[in-house]
Amino acid sequence: MKQRHHILFQQLDSYRSDVLQVLETVTEDIANTIPSGFYNNIRWNLGHIYLDQYLWIEALTNEKSKELEPLQSWFGYGTSPANFNEKTPSFEELKKLLKAQPIQIKELYGDRLDVEFPPIDMGMNTIEY
């Protein structure tokens, strides 16, 4: 693996570890509480982080994943905890998903970081050195 790819995955691991470390002090009750003045709770935000990471990859690669469909109804843009039901991942389940995600991304896409993808909505391209 190229050094720049290694650094990219180190950053993903580091940022994700930071998020998970903060969550060690958060209880299920706190995670499910919507603070006054906000539309979403910590649990929703964790699901959104997880989903959004894959949505950016989907936008770039134009490869859709059916596994993300239920997540979009709970954690996608414009949703809220009011969309939750008995199938919505719990706070603990979301923490496990977030912990595993960097490894999954590296396994699924780690060998494709040099692929040139067409620009997406924000006009971003693969980084060139």
Image: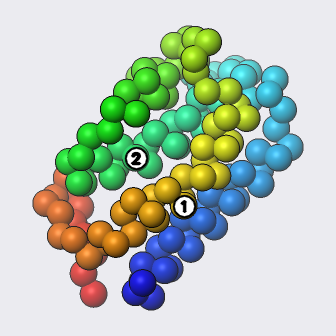
Mark yes or no: residue 24 visible.
yes
Residue 27 lies left or right of residue 91; in this view the side is: right
User: Residue at the spot x=82%, y=38% of the render?
Assistant: 26
Percent x, y of residue 126: 25, 70
- Residue 88 in which image quadrant: top right
User: Residue at the spot x=46%, y=65% of the render?
Assistant: 106
Which mark lies nearer to you, 2 or 1? 1
| Residue located farthest toward the left when viewing the structure as drawn | 118
Residue 17 lies left or right of residue 4; in this view the side is: right
Quadrant of image for the N terminus: bottom left
- Residue 129 in which image quadrant: bottom left
* Residue in the foreground of this view, choosing between 96 and 40: 96
User: Residue at the spot x=47%, y=73% of the render?
Assistant: 8
* Residue in the foreground of this view, choosing between 66 and 50: 66
- Dot 1 amino acid type: Ile
The residue at which mark 2 appears reads as: 54
User: Could you give the CA–CA distance between mark 2 and mark 1, rounded to whole angstroms?
Assistant: 13 Å
Image: 62 above or below 33: below
Image: 105 above or below 33: below
Mark yes or no: residue 77 visible.
no
| Badge 2 density bin: few <14, some 14–19, many ≥20, Cα 10 Å | some
Mark 1 lies on a secondary structure that is helix
User: Residue at the spot x=77%, y=45% of the render?
Assistant: 23
- Dot 2 amino acid type: Tyr
First in residue order: circle 2 vs circle 1 = 2
| Badge 1 density bin: few <14, some 14–19, many ≥20, Cα 10 Å | some
The residue at which mark 1 appears reads as: 103
